[in-house]
Amino acid sequence: MSSDVHADAATSEPKEMISKEELAASYGKSAAGYESMLDQEVIDKKVLYDKIVDMLLSGLGELEGPVADVSCGPGHVLAMLQERQKARPLMGSDLCQDMVDRAAKRLPDATFQRADMTDLSGAFKDAQLAGMINMFAIHHVDETGVKAALGEASRVLRGNGCLLLAFWEGPTHGAQMPSAPKEWGAAHLWSTAGMYDLAAAAGFDPVSEHQELEKEFDMNMAYLCLKKRS
């Protein structure tokens, strides 16, 4: 999970989307600091992270099989899941190779590769996964990209598979994030109601949700647990 959003008055004007290569390079440049930030965040926000993992485990129920984090960053959430379910196969992918390398170092028994959440054709087989994590990455794509990411999640998850989706919430679905760092280009806020509609169209039903205010940035974090229809 990333709370890496910084207030910047210069970002109040509409921005253009940047390429995925530029975005990956941006995260690569800040990877060490990003990892250190998350090292501390999982300590400071342990109650929240425990709740997130509980949501995922509840959604998985008795379903066996691998869980993949398609926005794995340095691998913190997968590491927390491994602490709870040591026997479950874990996989991860990220747009940034440096993040993938850091996650692989953190979790040497898991499988990692570089991949785009909107096109997982080279990363995961159809109906392979019992669960998927996608946390705080879909602000980097427009609604077409969100639909693609949800479609890919539906494709690679088994029937009744669980998707844990987290995003920055806003009252207007798809509005630009006013405090996004300049190096991100355009970033988007999504409404929970709008996300449920997109998830339903991709074949998912709601299981549970959690919202929490990130006081530092005065933005709401939304977490949705979704189940693929069998």
Image (cartoon, rainbow, N blue to C red):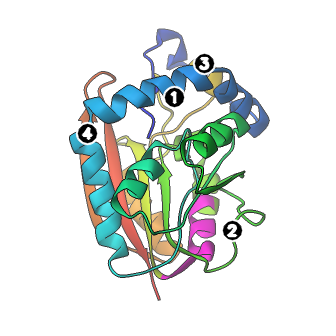
Circle 1 residues within 10 Å: few <14, some 14–19, many ≥20: some
**Residue 158 within the segment the image draws in magenta:** yes
Residue 207 point in image, percent of width and height:
30, 71
Q: CA distance from mark 2 to mark 3?
A: 32 Å
Residue 58's label in the rendered image is none
Residue 20 point in image, percent of width and height:
74, 39
**Residue 60 within the segment the image draws in magenta:** no
Mark toward the start of the polypeptide (4 vs 3): 4
Q: Which residue is mark 2?
A: 124
Tell me whether the residue at label 4 lies in contact with that at label 3, contact meaning CB atoms closer than 8 angstroms. no
Q: CA distance from mark 2 to mark 4?
A: 30 Å
In screen coordinates, is 82 left or right of 25?
Answer: left
Q: Please tell me which residue is depicted at 53% across the width and 11% down the height of the picture.
A: 10
Mark toward the start of the polypeptide (3 vs 1): 1
Kind of residue at disc 1: Glu
Asked whether 200 or 223 is in front, the reply is 223
Q: Which residue is mark 3?
A: 182
Q: Which residue is mark 4?
A: 46
Residue 46 higher or lower than 150, as above or below = above
Mark toward the start of the polypeptide (1 vs 4): 1
Circle 3 SS class: helix
Mark toward the start of the polypeptide (1 vs 2): 1
Kind of residue at disc 2: Phe
Q: CA distance from mark 3 to mark 1?
A: 20 Å
Q: Please tell me which residue is depicted at 32% across the width and 56% down the height of the picture.
A: 53
Kind of residue at disc 3: Lys
Q: Which residues are magenta?
A: 149-159
Residue 77 in sight here: yes
Circle 4 SS class: helix
Q: Please tell me which residue is depicted at 47% across the width and 69% down the height of the picture.
A: 88
Residue 35's label in the rendered image is 1
